[in-house]
Image (cartoon, rainbow, N blue to C red):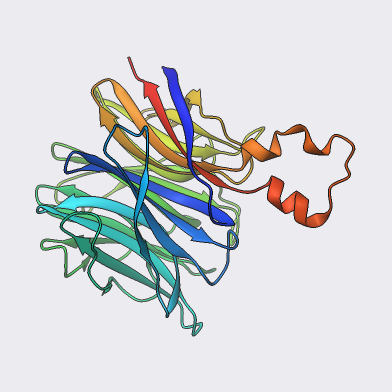
Amino acid sequence: MKLISVRRIWEQAAHNAFTDLIAFQEALFCVFREGTAHVSPDGALRILRSVDGGETWQSVALIRSEEADLRDGKLIEYQGELLLLGGGTLHDKSGIQSHLWRSADGRVWSDALKIADKGYWLWRLTEHQNTLYGVGYRPGPDGDTRLYKSDDGVRFKTWLKVFNNQGYVNETAIVFDQDSGFCLLRRDPVWGPEFVGLLGHSRAPFTDWQWQELDKRIGGPVMLMYQSRLLAVVRLYDEQVRTALVEIHPDTGVVQELLTLPSKGDTSYAGVVIDGNELWVSYYSSHELADSPLDTQNLLDESSRAAKAKTMIYFAKIQLS
């Protein structure tokens, strides 16, 4: 594994974060949230496009909602269209609603379609044999997760009412390999002591999942199958918080760090595209200004310190083999 290049591609908002990446119609599309802070009521989903392999990027869309703070945009190609999944924290305090937008070209987008159960955050969609699967999580001390599926990209039905409830389980990444499915599941010690990640395995029709406890806490997972290996880009919490490419070993639960991306602090939530033997990664981080020598004498005021921790969007290329 070797880091070929990394470049900053966006920094214009006060807080730029939570990315995803896809190749569609001979171009790359990167989506991320813009807002005034990590948690703020004004989140919007910005979409960038690159036609030269990530060398240059142009903004092609900005999706807002008058009803909700939008965040955690995820992109998937399905039946010839580009779909954008996003969560909305409703301004009326009534909870969480997942939304889906569709586009023929990545530039012009439909109105939002409300999908899944209100209160469940549908995190990411993965296609298998022309069916979409995704896990929604419901935060709270009695929270849980549900597995959803859709055969048309419009109607999402509950496929497994209780997917996992072993602690505060939330963010997920699913990959399929023939008739097998794997799910990387984040846990946080918020409403219970459990904090290390979980890896689930199931076979079609994906109604019975077996779970393996991992040896590390992970966040913001995205997973891929490469040469029969389970690779993921995650946030790691041991020592310095960072975004890293890891291998998940299903038999032992070991999370093996393969490569650390330039990152620190508020970071992670990657998107990935495989191009031959290269892995192209979008992610966000606050390391660049935090590592600058601006405050060697501890003289910065509060606003300057906030600027130092500013999160920005990055695009990296990794040589896999």
Q: Which picture quadrant has residue 47? A: bottom left
- Residue 146 visible: no
Q: Nearer the viewer, residue 17 or 127?
A: 17
Image-based side of 249 in relation to 115, left or right:
right
Who's the residue at 44% across and 29% down the image? 245
The C terminus: image quadrant:
top left
- Residue 245 visible: yes
> Residue 257, how many percent across, how many down?
49, 25
Q: How many marks?
A: 0
Q: Nearer the viewer, residue 4 or 147?
A: 4
Who's the residue at 28% across and 56% down the image? 134
Image-based side of 141 in relation to 282, left or right:
right
> Residue 241, how many percent across, how many down?
62, 38
Q: Which picture quadrant has residue 175? A: top left
Reply above or below: 260 against 202.
Answer: above
> Residue 31, how many percent across, how many down?
37, 52
The N terminus: image quadrant:
top left
Reply above or below: 291 against 270.
Answer: above
> Residue 103, how many percent across, how many down?
19, 60
